[in-house]
Image (cartoon, rainbow, N blue to C red):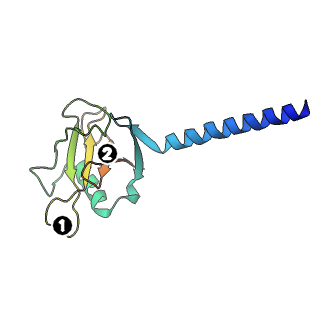
Amino acid sequence: MIRFAALLRLALFVALAGAFGMHNAQARHADQGHNGEFIALVTLADLPPEAQHTLHLIQRGGPFPYPRKDGSTFGNFENRLPKQARGYYREYTVPTPGSRDRGARRIIAGEGRTGNVANAREYYYSDDHYRSFRRIRQP
């Protein structure tokens, strides 16, 4: 009977530890993309300085280095971001030092509940031209 109680306690401990571990793993993800993949988080401080500056410009309303492209609708055709109505997401260029064109880095801004990307606080960073995203966590 003592052996059974010890095994029961051990099983309960393992089950609780596993549940706690899964909770923490999910807490590191902000959203789930339309394709079912979780979107990792990145802190503002962990972004390159150019991305931090671009986010500041978005929140300030510009001016942007590529006015014809920055602020245009992002279609989410890759389905890597949460599904939203067309026009919900806007894309902004994150300059790449030494690049002769816009480069691959972007911030995608969602309208959020406010309907305004400047203050909705829903921002995603891609450094590989939309192949992957990380949600920007701001203080």
Residue 123 is marked as 2
The residue sitting at 85% across, 32% down in the picture is 5
Q: Secondary structure at mark 2?
A: strand
Q: Position of residue 86 (x, y in %)?
A: 19, 32
Q: Amino acid at mark 2?
A: Tyr
The CA span between labels 1 and 2 is 23 Å
Question: Of the residues under marks 1 and 2, which one precedes in the sequence?
Answer: 1
Relative to 69, say whether 34 is above or below: above
Check disc 1 and report the residue beneath it.
Answer: 99
> Relative to 91, is 44 on the left or the right?
right
Front-most of 12 and 68? 12
Q: Secondary structure at mark 1?
A: loop
Front-most of 139 and 13? 13
The residue sitting at 23% across, 34% down in the picture is 88
Front-most of 65 and 99? 99
Quadrant of the snapshot with the N terminus:
top right
Q: Amino acid at mark 1?
A: Ser
Place residue 34 in its image quadrant.
top left
